[in-house]
Amino acid sequence: MLKRGVYAASLSVLNKDLTLNVEATISHGEYLIKNGCTGVFFMGSTGMAQLCSIESKKELISKIASHKLKKQFFIGLGVNSLSDSISLIKYANEYEINKEILIGAPAYYKNNTDQGVFQFFQRIISECPKVKIVIYNFEKLFHYKFSVEAVTNLFNAFPKNIVGVKDSSYNLFENLKIKDFLIFPGSEAKLLKGLEQGCAGCISAVTNVTHSLARKVFDDFENKNPQTKNDQLIAVRETFDEYNLISALHSLHSIKDENYKNILPPLVLLSEEKQNELIEKLNKLKFVSKKNLAA
């Protein structure tokens, strides 16, 4: 069950033939939880879900269903088709993954309306009445931005199904006020500010590397301790925001593990120049250095 905390939108690890390396992907999620994450979301945008096959997603679902950390593993869908969305949810239900699933509006078309998006979720819920949905609000990817009114209307219509939101457009986390509703900004740069506004934590791409730092900020807030790491956390996140996040994260992880060099087109790794530039910036923030990356 989803709860307050720091979550990673987890990377997907690929084989050389660009198929999903399910075991390595799960191991990456394990590492993140061991080092500070409350849980991980597989097959979000950071996990290249829009580019991964339905078959690979089903294989991942079947593996995490019996994993010792299954209570801390969550999934996204990363598909545009209504029928594929329903099919994946029903498949997850077969494996008793009946908990929260991250679902955005269908991507690609730029004329999404509140009415059309409402009907998309309505259809999903009518076919999968037990589903728990965390709405994924990310206008940059989906070409649709959930308003406070749109989320409120969905919650009022389906209070047992619409349980939270990941806000990567940042128009909701300070303005949406629904009792017992989980709101997660999509950036750890908004973590502390969100917690002060009543949010539940964050679900972020960059917690693939800032997991321990973000958890420190979260725990200090929860325990009413002075904040000592938030400025560094924000600076690190803002540094990554200067690059394509998936490219930057895979490039950084590939220094220790070449499997992370495998990335699905049209995505590419950072150039050597840009990778070195990123590491230099992170070194100045006393976050990472090439020496400890290669250790």
Image: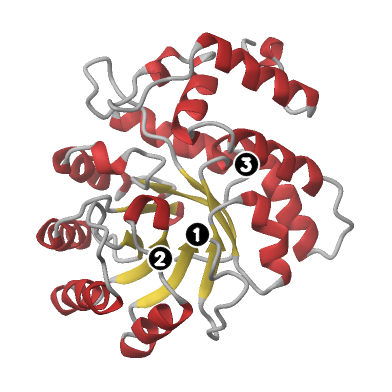
Identified by mark 1, the residue type is: Ser
Q: In the rendered image of this protein, does residue 215 appear above or below residue 242? A: below
Q: Is residue 280 visible?
A: yes
Q: Secondary structure at mark 3?
A: helix
- Which residue is at a point 41% across and 41% down the rendered structure image? 46
Front residue of 40/241: it is 241
Q: CA distance from mark 3 to mark 2?
A: 27 Å
Which percent across, then down, holds residue 113?
A: 27, 73
Which comes sooner in the sequence, label 1 or label 2? 2
Which image quadrant: the C terminus?
A: top right
Label 3, residues with CA under 10 Å away: few <14, some 14-19, many ≥20: many
Identified by mark 2, the residue type is: Lys
Where on the picture, by quarter, is residue 240?
Answer: top right
Q: Secondary structure at mark 2?
A: loop
Horizontally, residue 246 falls left or right of residue 185, namely left
Residue behind mark 2: 145
Label 2, residues with CA under 10 Å away: few <14, some 14-19, many ≥20: many
Which percent across, then down, holds residue 5?
A: 60, 59
Residue behind mark 3: 211
Which comes sooner in the sequence, label 3 or label 1? 1
Where on the picture, by quarter, is residue 191?
Answer: bottom right
Horizontally, residue 125 falls left or right of residue 283, namely left
Q: Are marks 1 and 2 in contact (CB under 8 Å)?
A: yes
Which percent across, then down, holds residue 62?
A: 23, 46
Front residue of 214/168: it is 168
Q: CA distance from mark 1 to mark 2?
A: 7 Å
Name the mark nearer the viewer: 3 or 2.
Answer: 2
Q: Secondary structure at mark 1?
A: loop
- Which residue is at a point 47% across and 62% down the rendered structure image? 166
Residue 169 badge: 1
Which percent across, then down, holds residue 274?
A: 56, 17
Identified by mark 3, the residue type is: His
